[in-house]
Amino acid sequence: MRKYHRVDVRLGRQDRQQIAGMLSRGRESARVLRRALILRQLDQGQRAAQAALNVGMAPKTVRAIARRYEEEGLESALRERPRHGKQPALDARQSQRIIAMVCGPPPEGRARWSVRLIAEEAVKRKLTPAVGRETIRILLESHDLKPWREKNVVYRRGG
């Protein structure tokens, strides 16, 4: 069994007041309120394992919250940093050009556009250096286009 060092959190007066206000109002997200409750329990002298049991978290998570409070302050302990995420495969200009291509007639010898054909043609026409079928499928889905069902996506309006 692994021994952990004892977590010793001492909240400052302002931090204690801010946490008490947050917990009494309850207008924050459940995650933030849980973290505030953990910090308050640790400040009252409870061990990490007991505080974790009280709020339904792992003791490791409680220790991480306490460590973040000690190193970076209250705001960092209560709220997560924004995550970067993956860059989109297509930028707005590339997406628009691919949609415009799909709204036009399919290549010579083809009756309809397919997702695979769109991906190949986008690279062939140098609209994008590389693109996958799934990226094209999601792009079409977001614009509510199903070019494989119809011979021509864009219709002339009568008038």
Image (cartoon, rainbow, N blue to C red):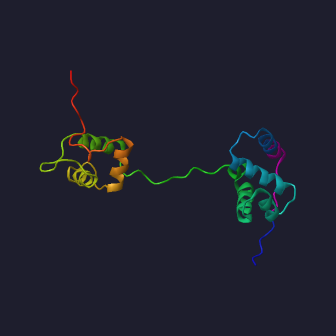
Q: For this view, does 69 lie left or right of residue 145?
A: right
Q: Magenta stretch: residue 94 in it?
A: no
Occupied quadrant, residue 95:
top left
| Extreme residue toward the front, this view | 149
| Extreme residue toward the top, this view | 159
- Image quarter in which the C terminus is found: top left
The residue that appears at 23% across and 48% down in the rendered structure is: 113
How many labels, in total? Answer: 0
The residue that appears at 36% across and 52% down in the rendered structure is: 135
Occupied quadrant, residue 61:
bottom right
Occupied quadrant, residue 60:
bottom right
Q: Magenta stretch: residue 14 in it?
A: yes
Range shown magenta: 7-17
The residue that appears at 73% across and 54% down in the rendered structure is: 69
Q: Please say whether residue 10 is visible from this viewpoint.
A: no
Residue 74 position within the rendered picture, expressed as x and y whole percent measured from the top left: 73, 49
Instruction: Compare residues 145 and 90 and report the one nearer the observer.
Output: 145
Q: Please say if 3 is above or below 79.
A: below
Instruction: Compare residues 129 and 144 and report the one nearer the observer.
Output: 144
Q: For this view, does 128 lie left or right of residue 27?
A: left
- Image quarter in which the N terminus is found: bottom right
| Extreme residue toward the bottom, this view | 1
Q: For this view, does 112 lie left or right of residue 12?
A: left
Instruction: Compare residues 79 and 148 and report the one nearer the observer.
Output: 148
| Extreme residue toward the right, this view | 44
Q: Please say whether residue 137 is visible from this viewpoint.
A: yes
Instruction: Compare residues 150 and 3 and report the one nearer the observer.
Output: 150
Residue 112 position within the rendered picture, expressed as x and y whole percent measured from the top left: 20, 47
Residue 141 position within the rendered picture, expressed as x and y whole percent measured from the top left: 37, 45
Residue 54 position within the rendered picture, expressed as x and y whole percent measured from the top left: 80, 58
